[in-house]
Amino acid sequence: MLKTYLTVMLGGALGTGLRMAISVGMAARFGETFPIGTLVVNVTGCFLIGLFAAFTSPEGAYPVSNLMRQFVMIGIMGGYTTFSSFGLQTLYLLQRGDWLRAGLNSGLSLFLCLIAVWLGHLCATVLQPR
């Protein structure tokens, strides 16, 4: 179990560093009026986790160990973007024909995360010393 945690943590460090490099690079190139870096990271993360998951599953063309899947999918991609996990999980719901849960996952994720960001911002504004 410790080996799995350390492996995932190493992957997370790599993913986080990559996310920062891309976000900073995109902001330097295109400015910060639109979060293009975050959008690029989220979209590429979703693409990459879908690609890796399909290729490396037991039925895939290049099956790998569970530890390697955890390193990449939870570690690297989790550090790179948690949106990739959301995208993959929603895809699996859709593939199973569970349109209701896929819709709920999408709608609730968007709505609740926006509310949470707003509430966090509000709390910080209220609690800051003046």
Image: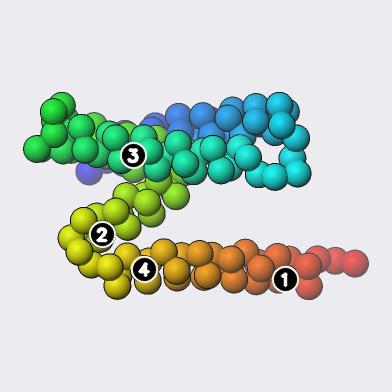
Q: Quarter holding the C terminus? A: bottom right
**Figure quadrant of residue 94:** bottom left
Cα distance in 3D space between marks 2 and 4: 9 Å
Which residue is depicted at the point 52% across and 70% down?
A: 112
Which residue is depicted at the point 33% across and 39% down?
A: 49
21 left or right, relative to 10: right
Cα distance in 3D space between marks 2 and 3: 16 Å
Q: Which mark is residue 103?
A: 4
**Figure quadrant of residue 73:** top left
Which residue is depicted at the point 41% across and 64% down?
A: 106
Choose the circle earlier in sequence order: 2 or 4.
Answer: 2
Choose the circle earlier in sequence order: 2 or 3.
Answer: 3
Cα distance in 3D space between marks 1 and 3: 34 Å
Q: Which mark is residue 49?
A: 3
Residue 81 visible: yes
Q: Which mark is residue 122?
A: 1
State which mark lies toward you, 3 or 4: 4
Choose the circle earlier in sequence order: 4 or 1.
Answer: 4
State which mark lies toward you, 2 or 3: 2
Cα distance in 3D space between marks 3 and 4: 20 Å
Q: Which residue is mark 2?
A: 94
Choose the circle earlier in sequence order: 3 or 4.
Answer: 3
The amino acid type of the residue labelled 1 equals Leu
- Tell me where residue 51 appears, x and y as whole percent: 29, 35
Q: Residues within 10 Å of mark 2 (few under 14, many from 20)?
A: some
- Tell me where residue 20 appears, x and y as whole percent: 59, 33
